Amino acid sequence: MEIGAHVSSAGGIHTAIDRAEAIGADSVQVFTQSPRAWRPTNHDPATFDRFRERRTEAGMGGVLCHAVYLCNLAAPDRDVYVLVGDGSYLMLAQELVTAVQEGIKIIVVVVDNHGYASIGSLSRSLGSQGFGTHYRYRKAGSLGLDGEGPQGDTLPIDLAANAASLGAVSERVRTIAELRAALARAKRAVSPYVITIETDRYESVPDYGSWWEVAPAEVSGLAEVRAARERYETGRKRARRELRPPE
Ligand SMILES: Cc1ncc(C[n+]2csc(CCOP(=O)(O)OP(=O)(O)O)c2C)c(N)n1
Ligand SMILES: [Mg+2]
């Protein structure tokens, strides 16, 4: 069984292997282009050769990219894996009931970082300090802002117990070794199987390498938000339409 991570490929696709190797990953996942942009990345073909060489040198196993979400659904002879965050799990958990009812075996790994980490990161990049993206108790009147120092305790949400209550087999793991063992059990199982693991809010996928049109507030008491608004206005001026009606 291979365990890896999504890593940055900034500086050429082959550099992903260096980064995966550095963290001891057995497999690697990359963006082949920015998921925020229509235009594909113009890869230098030499980096593909370098990627293959580096992969062999490093003995790197599976290579995954974000283009193939639905492929495994079309392969009934293989296991289907779902990797989902705790926030998304809370929005979609009831789908497990359908999987139980229909006897569809899915293996769900819930990456629990106690909140909406990716939205928190977007919020920080716009000066809004991760407001409202923590699953934490209110502390001194605050729901918890990134950069505010020690935050309130995490909420006692037990997603493994939640999954079990919906009819799935579930377990909570704490280490990569435990995750490997749990995945081996999940592979042998015949019903939907949910594994939860705690992760760090501030370890995330790398930069998307593109501008994203997200409008910060026009009026704010926070200097960071006003600065983000200025960057937004400048970005809007540079934006071009990629899709045009046929001439
Ligand atoms: C149906 C839907 N609602 C809201 C969003 C906006 N959204 C994108 S990521 C995210 C938070 C996801 O949190 P979590 O699943 O815990 O993943 P994390 O970013 O913490 O890894 C939200 C609300 C969305 N993409 N789709
Ligand atoms: Mg989360």
Image (cartoon, helix red, strand yellow):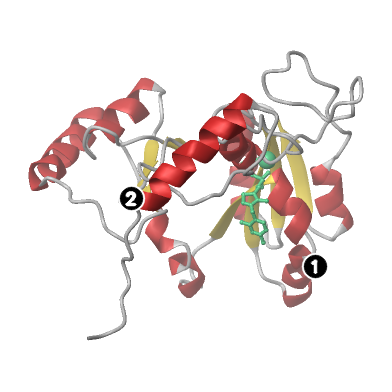
Nearer to me, 198 or 182 = 198
Q: Residue at x 17, y 41 (%)?
A: 52
Horizontal arrangement in the rendering, residue 247 relative to residue 211 (left or right): left
**Position in image of residue 29 (x %, y %):** 39, 43
Secondary element under disc 1, as helix, strand or loop, is helix
Nearer to me, 78 or 218 = 218
Task: Judge whether 223 appears above or below 97 on screen.
Answer: above
Whether label 1 touches label 2, CB < 8 Å: no
Q: Residue furthest bottom?
A: 247
Q: Which residue is mark 1?
A: 97
Residue 1 makes an appearance in the image: no
Which amino acid type corresponds to the residue marked 1 in the rendered image?
Val
Q: Find residue 24 and report its image quarter.
A: top left
Task: Judge whether 156 appears above or below 247 on screen.
Answer: above
**Position in image of residue 125 (x %, y %):** 54, 33
- Quarter for ligand 2? top right
Q: Image quadrant for the C terminus?
A: bottom left
Q: Residue at x 71, y 41 (%)?
A: 196
Nearer to me, 185 or 135 = 135
Q: Find residue 156 and report its image quarter.
A: top right
- Pair 1/2: label in front: 2
Nearer to me, 185 or 117 = 117
Q: Which residue is mark 2?
A: 238
Residue 56 makes an appearance in the image: yes
Q: Residue at x 53, y 31 (%)?
A: 227
Which amino acid type corresponds to the residue marked 2 in the rendered image?
Arg
Q: Is mark 2 within 8 Å of ligand 1?
A: no
Q: Residue furthest front?
A: 219
Q: Residue at x 31, y 82 (%)?
A: 245
